[in-house]
Amino acid sequence: MNERPLPLFGPGFDPGPSFADLLRRTSPPDAGPAQAPGAQQASVDIPHGTTVVAIRFADGVVLAGDRRATSGFAIASRRIEKVFPADEYSGVAFAGVAGPGNEMVRLFQTQLEHYEKIEGESLSLEGKANQLAQMVRANLPAAMQGLIVVPLFAGFDERRGHGRVFSFDATGGKYEEADFQTNGSGGVHAKNWIKAQWREGMSADAAIDLAVRSLFAAADEDTATGGPDLVRHIFPTVALIDADGYRAWSDDEVARRAQALLGGREEGAGL
């Protein structure tokens, strides 16, 4: 197998702030497998990630997601990760096809790191959201074939001093949400729960409880959303982003919070 050598850059070459553009300039086009006109591809059961939520609170934002991935009517994974740090002060969560979703997240992380190294400063939160929108737009040809990836992006805006939440559509459209947003097959159920209880100025603890509760509610209504699994010790992924940066909660921390909420449910206090 012939390996393509790494590109070499002269001292006068400027790679530019966009890592994605650099890849396009230095990599050969991917021709892909030839296919006869009118031919149909065989259907393949591909793992899909499901429900993710982003909630703004008084000092930042909370990102959370369930751990289930489905392939058709089967459970493909019970421990998939859908919530990731984008950089020190922002995070991204995705719903959709798991493979391209993970690839998009890794490319986004690399793009932000590349920009900071080239320019000597980090992008604004708005600029990061614009970069992610371009990546979602670049995935549109794959999305038209059913390989849809739609992320949520959230972070602490150091220039404005508060948290912000951004959602996207499959064409790369970017929309800032004033308070919260959800995505995935169980997103509508999670959103209805959040809408009923979200309040301006709520604390971080209240926002985390609301995120976990909303995922429980989604799991009750949507078969593709995984609820808390006390036997396997599988609980939602939760991350907090504020002026201190991105902090992912450990499984033990989420387990204690989830078990407390489940206990309240058994006592008739609701989810």
Image (spheres, rainbow, N blue to C red):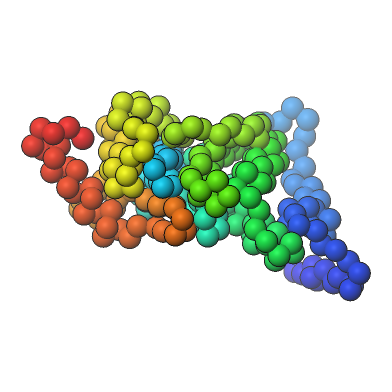
Q: Residue at x 40, y 52 (%)?
A: 240
Q: Residue furthest front?
A: 160
Q: Residue at x 62, y 34 (%)?
A: 174
What is the x, y in percent for residue 58? 39, 43
In the rendered picture of this protein, how many numbered marks are placed on residues?
0
Q: Residue at x 37, y 50 (%)?
A: 238
In this rendering, position of residue 203 left or right of residue 35: left
What is the x, y in percent for residue 89? 52, 55
In this rendering, position of residue 84 left or right of residue 268: right
What is the x, y in percent for residue 36? 77, 34
In this rendering, position of residue 139 left or right of residue 2: left
Q: Quadrant of residue 184?
A: top left
**Visible residue check, residue 269:** yes
What is the x, y in percent for residue 4? 79, 67
Q: Is residue 218 above or below residue 92?
A: above
**Visible residue check, residue 114:** no
Q: Is residue 237 above or below residue 199?
A: below
Q: Is residue 131 above or below residue 116?
A: above
Tell me the quarter of the image containing the C terminus.
top left
Tell me the quarter of the image containing the N terminus.
bottom right
Q: Residue at x 49, y 32 (%)?
A: 178
